[in-house]
Every structure is written in C-alpha cells, then in structure tokens.
Image: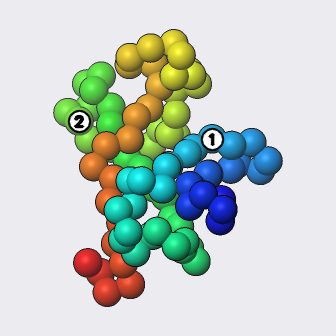
Amino acid sequence: EQSTGNWWLYLWSTPIGYWPQSIFNGGLLTNGADTLSWGGEIYDSSGTGGFHTLTQMGSGHFSHEGYKKACYVRNIFYTGPDGK
C-alpha cells in the first residue's frame, strides 16, 4: 500500500501475506521493489535420511490445524542486486 508503506502479498485477488512497514526499518525495501522471488525446500523426516524428495511442496493442511500440519517460514532474507 503506497499510502501506508505496508506490504500485501496476493494470490490472484486473495491476500495471503502481510508485512507491516515497521519491519523494513528504512532499508532498501521501504519504498518498494521491482521483482520478488520466492522458493522453498522440501524435507522428508519419514526415513529418507532428511534428503530432498520428489514430493510437491505443501501438506494440504491449513495453519489453523496446528503445529506439524502446515508449512512455516524461517531464515528469510533479502539479497540485493549486489548479492549482499
């Protein structure tokens, strides 16, 4: 939102993510971005030794179902054009 500086992530017309302006602390993303890429990893703890699998991402569960049902995000970071 340009009026507030808050960031919203939409999937088609449905908002699925929100980041308040306050977390950007006046950094590079405070005023916007041209491109945003998102990725992830798959971890299988059921006997493959923790190796990646051919499984698609997602469990089919929603976050309101509780811990170990839906995904979560950690160690997220921003890499600028200079790689830093």
Query: Above or below — where is 74 with respect to 59?
Result: below
Label 2 sits on what residue type?
A: Gly
Disc 2 target residue: 50
Residue type, label 1: Ile
What's the mark number on residue 46?
none
Q: Residues within 10 Å of mark 1 (few under 14, many from 20)?
A: few
Query: In the image shown, does 82 or 1 lie closer to the viewer?
Result: 1
Q: CA distance from mark 1 to mark 2?
A: 29 Å
Q: Earlier in the sequence, mark 1 or mark 2?
A: 1
Q: Is residue 35 left or right of residue 30?
A: right
SS of the residue under disc 2 = loop
- Rendered residue at 63%/41% (across/down): 16
In the image, taking residue 22 as reference, residue 76 lies left or right, namely: left
Residue 1, image x and y in percent? Answer: 65, 59
Where residue 66 appears, x then y in whole percent? Answer: 44, 14
Question: 68 or 29, which is in the foreground?
Answer: 29
Q: Which mark is on residue 16?
A: 1
Q: Residue at x 36, y 78 (%)?
A: 80
Tag 1 secondary structure: strand
Mark 2 neighbour density, 10 Å: few (under 14) some (14–19) many (20 or more): few
- Which residue: 51% across, 22% down? 63
Residue 17 is left or right of residue 45, and the answer is right
Q: Position of residue 19 (x, y in %)?
A: 50, 49
Image quarter in which the C terminus is found = bottom left
